[in-house]
Image (cartoon, rainbow, N blue to C red):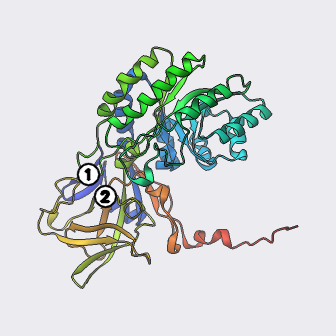
Amino acid sequence: MDHFAFENGALRCEGVTLASIAANAGTPTFIYSAATLRMHIHALRQAFAPIDPLICFSVKSCPNLSVLRLVAGEGCGMDVVSPGELQRALAAGVPTNKIAYAGVGKTHEALTEAITLGVGCMNVESAEELEMIAAVAAHLRRPTSLALRINPDVDAVTHRHTTTGTRATKFGVSVQRAEELFDRMRDHSFAHLEGLHLHIGSPVFDATRYAAAIEVALGLIDRLQRNGHTIRTLDLGGGFAADYQTGQAPSPADYAAAILPLVLPLKNRGVKFVLEPGRFIAANAGVLLLQVIRTKRESGKTFVICDAGMNALLRPSHYDAFHFLWPVQPIDGLIPRGRSDNTGLSPLEICDVVGPLCETGDYLALDRALPPMRGGDLLCVFTAGAYGMSMSSRYNAQPLPAEVLVQGDTATLVRKRETLTELIAHEMHITPLALG
């Protein structure tokens, strides 16, 4: 489900070769396919059409403004988790009533801004946060719609850093606490607790994990409604997987088949639904384009050293994540069979693909089979559109990469490469603090 393909021995994004992008924009550069972003949104909307959910794109997955504007243009709202992400959603033209605000660390200032702006729904993470929201809403005299994030204690069977639905994590409240909080807020004049929020982790490859979490929510909804509470929304969260390897992830229809039979009765009772996809929409819509600095062969090991590593794409070292890599113009036109390690292809060389940083953990792939690589060759890291640029850093004083959006035969620089001057700009003007 993407628009990156080899044609006449050269890798293209839609109608543009990656080599031509490198020649104009340099490397490292993230490249996004507009057609792929739209395709994934349409596939998700079609699969879940029976409940007509508001699709709120997860800004944290790919926060580039041009990408957000494109997604908003397809009718999507935004899922934000910070004042900065809220600012990006607003700058992308997203109406405030299509913004869901989540995150465990909302400050008093952040809540004041969000409530003043009238965000569509505030997803509440704790009893303590609910108390602060209620106080802010009352002070501002602004009615505020709230959805309580419940922790269903369901294991998403994903990496420990991205599991969010078990009691061991910092997210949400227990089902028992949820009933207490609904009762506490029953008659509040401004803070209207009228929804539930679920998010069990990402990426979730087993669709039945969603069903298990939803079953918990359904039992809670039944008890709340019997107790006189109105439930207007159910935010089903996100976490749908992407194909980091060919055929790895369920389709939108697979997820829908597990979810829809459970929630359709709620639709008939007037409940509205929210989905918060990020990875599913953006991951395979983006790649990271690198240049090989040199290949080092030492003590029986081969290292392909590139001009960026974990500073541009943290996922391999942080999550033990697999990303398929392949040269943009392979020697002798050697084309991969699919997104796997392609070990059976010949002639290949087993190597570690690493970055330039002074860290042993600075790698993109270990023991990976690739055609022999030389300095100056271009290397593409696939499925890098989600949590690539958004998690990039300036470690070792490396400037942030550029970003390019491709639409058909047109490539647009949508974030210029950071310069060395810009890298230190915030430290050039020092200001004494007025202490005491």
Amino acid under disc 2: Phe
Residue at 50% from the left image edge and 47% from the top image edge: 66
Reply above or below: 361 against 66. Answer: below
Amino acid under disc 1: Gln
- Look at mark 2 in the image and give the residue it sits on: 322
Quarter residue 178 falls in: top right
Taking the image as drawn, is residue 62 in sight?
Answer: no
Q: Secondary structure at mark 2?
A: loop
Residue at 59% from the left image edge and 40% from the top image edge: 125
Quarter residue 101 falls in: top right
Q: Is residue 367 left or right of residue 23?
A: left
As drawn, the residue found furthest toward the top would be: 268
Q: Which mark is residue 245?
A: 1
Residue at 38% from the left image edge and 21% from the top image edge: 50
Q: Secondary structure at mark 1?
A: loop
The Cα–Cα distance between marks 2 and 1, rounded to whole angstroms, is: 8 Å
Q: Position of residue 152 (x, y in %)?
A: 47, 36
